[in-house]
Amino acid sequence: GAGVSQSPSNKVTEKGKDVELRCDPISGHTALYWYRQRLGQGLEFLIYFQGNSAPDKSGLPSDRFSAERTGESVSTLTIQRTQQEDSAVYLCASSVRSGSYNEQFFGPGTRLTVL
Amino acid sequence: KNEVEQSPQNLTAQEGEFITINCSYSVGISALHWLQQHPGGGIVSLFMLSSGKKKHGRLIATINIQEKHSSLHITASHPRDSAVYICAVVFMDSNYQLIWGAGTKLIIKP
């Protein structure tokens, strides 16, 4: 596809369940970011992947959150034992990285609702 | 501390008015984005700039590196411009992550 895609677009889950959110970056983009936006708040950085380097996990809010990326392709954000405060739109972005900053392109987001 | 401040937080205007949204940041940056977020949550990048001025249609973005300030202008505003506009910066000492302003909720009335 031409852009960043995310799935599912909407996810409703019960408190305590685990969820997986998927991001397919633009082909050839080596950098991938996860952000989240809780209702009425700004976006928060969660995690950053760059090629085969160790990811920057500094934004993950708790150890219930984890993310993986296979090479320079798909990434999965996993939230274990979901809580109501995890309800948010989770956004993925990708960019070309060549030693300097490059524009990030955003996916449509996954709206997560924890009941 | 790396901070981004936007103003105003909310802006309501009549169709046709000239709109200005401001963004200030605390330390040196590599780049600044202006983004548009519609009620459904999708985000569209309007501009990425590191100096000077860019124009696209009725939208103009300017940045003053010395003053650490950027503005987004909308000329001949239209109700379809109603959205949240977000300023996001990449600070020089960061891992290229975007630091977001709180956003400006713009409503253009017909």
Image: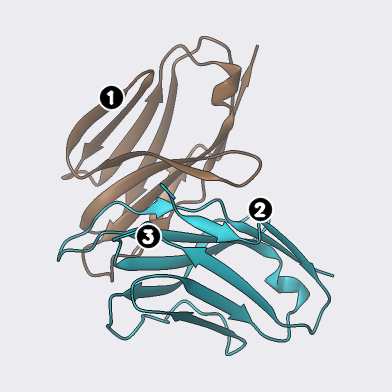
Residue B1 is at least partly visible in this image? no
For the C terminus of chain B, the quadrant is top right
Q: Specify the subunit that label 2 lies on.
A: A
Up/down of B13 relative to B29, above or below: above
Query: What's the amino acid at mark 2?
Result: Gly
Q: Quadrant of residue B82?
A: top right
Residue mark closest to the camera, 1 vs 2: 1
Q: Position of residue A25 (x, y in %)?
A: 41, 61
Q: Contact (CB < 8 A) between labels 3 and 1?
A: no
Q: Amino acid at mark 1?
A: Lys
Residue under label 1, please give it: B55
Please report the residue visible at 55 percent of the width from the left and 76 percent of the height from the top. Answer: A77
Tell me the colour chain A is drawn in. cyan
- Chain of the residue under the numbered disc 3 shown in the image: A
CA gap, disc 3 to disc 1? 24 Å
Any idea which chain is the brown one in this picture? B
Please tell me the numbered disc located at residue A40. 2
Name the residue carrying label 3. A94
Left or right, A27 with respect to A114, comes to left
Q: Residue at x 33, y 54 (%)?
A: B89
The quarter of the picture where the N terminus of chain B appears is bottom left
Q: Is residue A38 visible?
A: yes
Question: Which residue lies at the image location 24% right of the left edge and 29% below the top edge?
Answer: B54
> In which chain is the residue bearing label 1?
B
In the depicted structure, whether residue A104 falls above or below residue A76 = above
Q: Secondary structure at mark 1?
A: strand
Q: Quadrant of residue A81?
A: bottom right
Question: How many angstroms separate mark 3 from mark 2 (CA)?
Answer: 24 Å
Mark 2, secondary structure of its residue: loop
Check disc 1: other Cα within 10 Å, few if <14, some if 14-19, many if 20+.
some
